[in-house]
Image (cartoon, grey):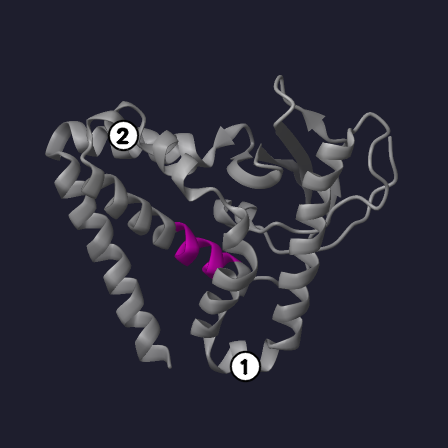
């Protein structure tokens, strides 16, 4: 078992898993140079976002909405929202119009940004994260970074990040918490809603939810 570096975070809601936090000091011997880059991406992103949160602690306490531009700047560039959106819609992606696809990517991205940002605001440093050896996928351009979050009086919580490489760039495409895929979970709920009410109704609902959250964010300023 390779040496690991441990940090802390409060993980009382599933979406804290979206936080790309810390990584191993020593990369597994079996890792290839390419997967090392994926591991480094997680490490660099975590260092930047946590350092920024610490640096801006007072401002975030007074102005919680400031977390949103931090997420946009540091974290979101490392997510492949087009691929995540395609997977989240499943077969409905093929039957959606170009404009519907464009709208869905925007609203789905906003939804994940809001959720992730709220999770980061709850960062307190109360629980340990242990990083396990990197697990390479069946294809050389896919890798899974596995972690476990220690929980008092309960089994460790497994959280796995799936990254995909395209044009020599690694990006996050899914996160699994206790074996449950974040994107697959949305895919199930979106699929049910589309079958019942149609794609347009889903887009209207997502837009309404995001707008309501944005309005609430503006009132905090």
Could you tell me which residue is drawn at 49 percent across and 30 percent down? Answer: 180
Q: Are marks 1 and 2 in contact (CB under 8 Å)?
A: no
Question: Would residue 182 appear left or right of 33 to someone viewing this image?
Answer: left
Which residue is label 2 attached to?
93
Viewer-closest of 82 and 200: 82
Mark 1 falls on what kind of element?
Answer: helix
Nearer the N terminus, badge 1 or badge 2?
A: 1
Could you tell me which residue is drawn at 46 percent across and 60 percent down? Answer: 118
Crowdedness near tag 1: few (<14), some (14–19) or many (≥20) residues, C-alpha within 10 Å = few
Viewer-closest of 10 and 57: 57
Q: Main secondary structure of the magenta part?
A: helix
Is residue 92 among the parts visible in the rendering? yes
Question: Would residue 101 appear left or right of 32 to someone viewing this image?
Answer: left
Q: Which is more foreground, mark 1 or mark 2?
A: 2
| Identity of the residue furthest to the front in this view | 167
Say which quadrant the N terminus sits in: top right
Q: Using the numbered discs, state the Cα–Cα distance from disc 1 to disc 2 in whole angstroms.
A: 40 Å
Which residue is label 1 attached to?
59
What x and y, as percent, mark residue 105?
A: 32, 45
Q: Magenta stretch containing residue 5, yes or no?
A: no
In the depicted structure, whether residue 89 falls above or below residue 41: above
Magenta region, residue range: 112-119
Q: Magenta stretch containing residue 117, yes or no?
A: yes
Could you tell me which residue is drawn at 16 percent across and 49 percent down? Answer: 204
Say which quadrant the C terminus sits in: bottom left
| Identity of the residue furthest to the top in this view | 138
Is residue 152 among the parts visible in the rendering? no
Viewer-closest of 104 and 57: 104
What x and y, as percent, mark residue 26?
A: 86, 41
């Amino acid at each position: 078992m390779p040496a690991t570096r441990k940090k802390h975070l409060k993980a009382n809601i599933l979406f804290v898993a979206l936080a790309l936090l810390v990584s191993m000091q020593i990369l597994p011997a079996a890792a290839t140079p390419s997967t090392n880059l994926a591991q480094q991406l997680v490490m660099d992103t975590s260092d930047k976002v946590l350092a920024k949160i610490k640096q801006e602690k007072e401002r975030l306490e007074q102005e919680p909405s400031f977390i949103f531009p931090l997420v946009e700047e540091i974290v979101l560039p490392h997510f492949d929202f087009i691929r995540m959106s395609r997977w989240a819609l499943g077969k409905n992606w093929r039957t959606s119009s170009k404009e519907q696809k464009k709208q869905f990517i925007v609203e789905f991205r906003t939804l994940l940004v809001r959720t992730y940002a709220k999770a980061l605001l709850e960062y307190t440093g109360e629980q340990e994260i242990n990083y396990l050896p990197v697990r390479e996928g069946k294809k050389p351009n896919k890798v899974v970074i596995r972690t476990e979050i220690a929980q008092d009086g309960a089994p460790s919580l497994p959280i796995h990040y799936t990254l995909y490489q395209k044009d020599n760039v690694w990006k996050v495409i899914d996160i699994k918490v206790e074996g449950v895929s974040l994107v697959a979970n949305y895919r199930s709920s979106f699929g049910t809603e589309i079958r019942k009410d149609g794609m347009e109704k889903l887009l209207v609902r997502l837009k309404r939810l995001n707008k309501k959250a944005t309005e609430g964010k503006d009132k905090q300023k």
